[in-house]
């Protein structure tokens, strides 16, 4: 059973002990797996390396010629190889069962320009 904490405005939210932190799960998995990830910063710089450790505010990565501490607030996105995510799903069971996304094959999504006739 999920416990809830009441906030000032009376809204209910899950207790901290029961919250699922996807960020921590992914970082921990790639750390244990020694997988290479790419971290993109707001400055446009990117780092490729293995996660050695992380905490609430930083990620420690080891690149080819360097160790780097990256502050999470400076990160725009982290790229993890697809095979690592598939491996993670297999290792942890229903890791993303609630977040499954189906990407339709090209041409079946009905997307594209609304009027495809030439001008």
Image (cartoon, rainbow, N blue to C red):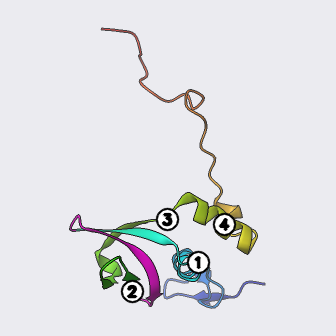
Q: Kindly identify which residue carries mark 1.
A: 33
The residue indicated by pointer 3 is 80
- Residue contact between numbered discs 3 and 4, judged by CB atoms under 8 Å: no
Percent x, y of residue 69: 32, 86
Identify the mark nearer the N-term, 1 or 3: 1
Span shown in magenta: 43-60
Q: Earlier in the sequence, mark 3 or mark 4?
A: 3
* Mark 4 Cα-neighbour bin, 10 Å: few <14, some 14–19, many ≥20: few
Say if the magenta span includes residue 84: no
Near-viewer residue (70 or 99):
70
Residues at circles 2 and 1 in contact by the CB criterion of under 8 Å: no
- N-term mark: 2 or 4: 2
Per the image, label 1 sits on a secondary structure element best described as helix
Cβ atoms under marks 3 and 2 closer than 8 Å: no
Label ID, residue 101: none
For mark 2, give the secondary structure.
Answer: strand
Q: Are marks 4 and 1 in contact (CB under 8 Å)?
A: yes
Q: Main secondary structure of the magenta part?
A: strand
Residue at image mark 4: 87
Q: Residue at x 76, y 70 (%)?
A: 93
Of badges 2 and 1, the one in the foreground is: 1
Question: In the rendered view, does 39 fall on the left or right side of 4?
Answer: left
């Amino acid at each position: 059973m999920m416990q809830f904490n009441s906030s000032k405005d009376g809204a209910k939210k899950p207790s901290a002990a029961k919250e699922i932190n996807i960020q921590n799960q992914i970082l921990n998995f790639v750390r244990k797996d020694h997988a290479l990830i790419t971290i993109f910063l707001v400055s446009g710089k990117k780092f490729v390396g293995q996660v050695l450790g992380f905490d609430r505010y930083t990620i420690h990565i080891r690149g080819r010629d360097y160790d780097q501490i990256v502050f999470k607030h400076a990160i725009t996105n982290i790229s993890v190889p697809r095979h690592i995510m598939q491996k993670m799903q297999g290792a942890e069971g229903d890791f993303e069962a609630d977040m499954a996304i189906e990407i339709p094959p090209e041409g079946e999504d009905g997307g594209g320009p609304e009027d495809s006739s030439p001008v």
